């Protein structure tokens, strides 16, 4: 009897294990899993008190969440039985500058932006008057984000935000974003069918998360709705207000292209090293194309940016450069937006051509960052992105190791660190 009882217990345990395995397989299958969806439905229902608290009606909540299903094919999710893939690689961090700030793309967007300058002339004049942000800058953001609205956003924003809140890597953030998206719908700013987004939930012509919508969205066309999805005046004004709220200074350029002297120290290319622009000029930095800087321009603080280390163009970046960087935390993104804004007004490309032809793999840059951290030269995120601080730390290592100081990541330098695989 005891043996039979033990056998029945073993069989029961095997049955439980088999059922668990089937559930795990179902959860990780290509299509939505019924068991997982039941838990998802329960999770969504649990958000009603938070939605009610910020004024979402029960009618809207039920209408939007009824039959809502998760999208387990989205990137950056934490799912049982699946490898952790993380977010998709952003072009800003895997392309060399000449690929990202592509001349043909810049020229094409600049030409279309000039047409839009005339088409939306009254709104753009008003936006610059009200928020201090020049028309070419907001148009450049519009062009970079969605190709002036011509790039179709592939996802249902509600489904994206709900899925990310349920099984994403940043659940708390997306939980708030999902509830705010319900509020946007409840207030009638956009219809559910038109609420399209990127895989990470950024919506509209100039790519706003719901929280940014409530901080910065503007009803600039006066129709009673803050419509960043289809109203160009609303979207441009909202982008301008966001820049203003992040500290945009009217009348200040985003950066100046310069020719760096041979004696320039590329390890100084970090935001923490800031000097009046005039001091950089006295140290031998020469404005590109013979540009003459006024006394007020020379008095403005600036930081050195060398996106390809000692190779390629160099820039003296102003406070407005870092304001744009808060829109997208990438030097190449800011270079694209800033340069496109210049090209909308004038046809000149960068004076110094880009020279790098390859970019290190993310895993190799991470290995380099870990080595630099162990050596006490780097204290920022290990993220595989060769930004300002990584390039500066790399230059400091090259100095200490007696290598050529170029502040540009390469397999040769990684091997010298002992970090190459």
Image: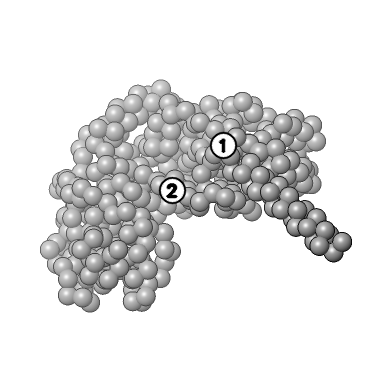
Of the residues tagged 2 and 1, which is closer to the observer?
1
Dot placed on the residue nearer the N-terminal end, 2 or 1: 1
Residue 136 horizontal/vertical position (percent): 36, 36
Asked whether the beta carbons under mark 2 and mark 1 sit within 8 Å of each other, the answer is no
Looking at the image, which residue sits at the far right?
1
Which quadrant of the rendered structure holds the N terminus?
Answer: bottom right
Q: Residue at x 20, y 48 (%)?
A: 357
Q: Which residue is mark 2?
A: 328
Badge 1: residue crowd in 10 Å (few <14, some 14–19, many ≥20): few
166 left or right of 46 in image:
left
Which SS class for mark 1?
loop
**Label 1 belongs to which residue?**
30
Question: Would residue 224 be seen by someone viewing this image from the given angle?
Answer: no
Q: Residue at x 26, y 38 (%)?
A: 102
Question: Residue 33: x, y in percent?
Answer: 66, 38
Q: Quadrant of the C terminus?
A: bottom left
- Looking at the image, residue 288 sits to the left or right of residue 189; the answer is left
Q: Residue at x 20, y 50 (%)?
A: 356
Seen from the viewer's position, the closer of residues 363 and 25 is: 25
Please indicate whether residue 108 sits to the left or right of residue 197 in the image: left
Question: In terms of depth relative to the viewer, which is nearer, 235 or 87?
Answer: 87
Q: Residue 345 location in percent, x, y?
A: 28, 34
Q: Label 2's element?
A: loop
> Is 260 located above or below residue 55 in the figure?
below
Q: CA distance from mark 2 to mark 1?
A: 32 Å
The percent coordinates of residue 331 (x first, y second) are 34, 52
Quarter of image, res 45: top right
- Reply above or below: 35 against 267: above
Seen from the viewer's position, the closer of residues 166 and 399 is: 166
Disc 2 residue crowd, few under 14, some 14–19, many 20+, Cα 10 Å: few
């Amino acid at each position: 009897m005891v043996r039979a009882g033990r056998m029945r217990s073993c069989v029961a345990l095997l049955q439980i294990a088999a059922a668990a395995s089937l559930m795990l397989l179902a959860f990780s299958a290509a299509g939505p899993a019924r068991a997982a969806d039941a838990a998802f439905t329960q999770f969504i229902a649990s958000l009603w008190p938070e939605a009610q608290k910020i004024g979402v009606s029960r009618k809207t909540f039920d209408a939007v969440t009824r039959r809502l299903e998760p999208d387990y094919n989205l990137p950056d999710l934490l799912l049982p039985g699946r490898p952790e893939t993380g977010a998709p690689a952003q072009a800003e961090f895997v392309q060399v500058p000449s690929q990202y700030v592509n001349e043909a793309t810049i020229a094409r967007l600049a030409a279309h932006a000039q047409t839009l300058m005339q088409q939306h002339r009254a709104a753009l004049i008003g936006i610059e008057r009200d928020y201090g942000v020049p028309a070419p800058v907001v148009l450049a953001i519009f062009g970079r984000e969605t190709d002036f609205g011509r790039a179709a956003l592939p996802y249902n924003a509600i489904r994206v935000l709900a899925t990310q809140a349920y099984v994403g890597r940043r659940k708390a953030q997306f939980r708030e974003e999902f509830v705010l998206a319900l509020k946007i719908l409840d207030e009638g700013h956009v219809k559910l069918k038109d609420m399209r987004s990127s895989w990470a939930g950024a919506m509209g012509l100039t790519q706003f998360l719901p929280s940014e919508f409530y901080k910065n969205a503007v009803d600039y066309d006066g129709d009673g709705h803050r419509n960043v999805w289809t109203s160009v005046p609303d979207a441009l004004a909202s982008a301008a207000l966001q820049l203003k709220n992040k500290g945009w200074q009217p009348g200040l350029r985003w950066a100046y292209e310069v020719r760096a002297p041979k004696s320039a120290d590329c390890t100084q290319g970090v935001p923490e090293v800031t000097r009046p622009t005039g001091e950089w000029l006295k140290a031998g930095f020469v404005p590109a194309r013979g540009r003459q800087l006024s006394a007020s321009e020379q008095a403005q603080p600036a930081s050195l940016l060398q996106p390809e280390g000692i190779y390629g163009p160099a820039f003296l970046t102003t406070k407005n450069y870092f304001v744009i960087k808060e829109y997208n935390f990438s030097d190449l993104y800011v270079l694209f937006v800033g340069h496109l804004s210049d090209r909308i007004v004038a046809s000149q490309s960068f004076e110094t051509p880009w020279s790098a032809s390859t970019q290190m793999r993310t895993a190799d840059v991470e290995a380099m960052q870990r080595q630099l951290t162990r050596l006490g030269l780097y204290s920022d995120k290990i993220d595989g992105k060769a930004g300002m601080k990584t390039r500066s730390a790399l230059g400091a290592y090259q100095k200490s190791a007696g290598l050529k100081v170029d502040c540009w990541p390469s397999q040769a330098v990684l091997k010298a660190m002992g970090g190459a695989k």
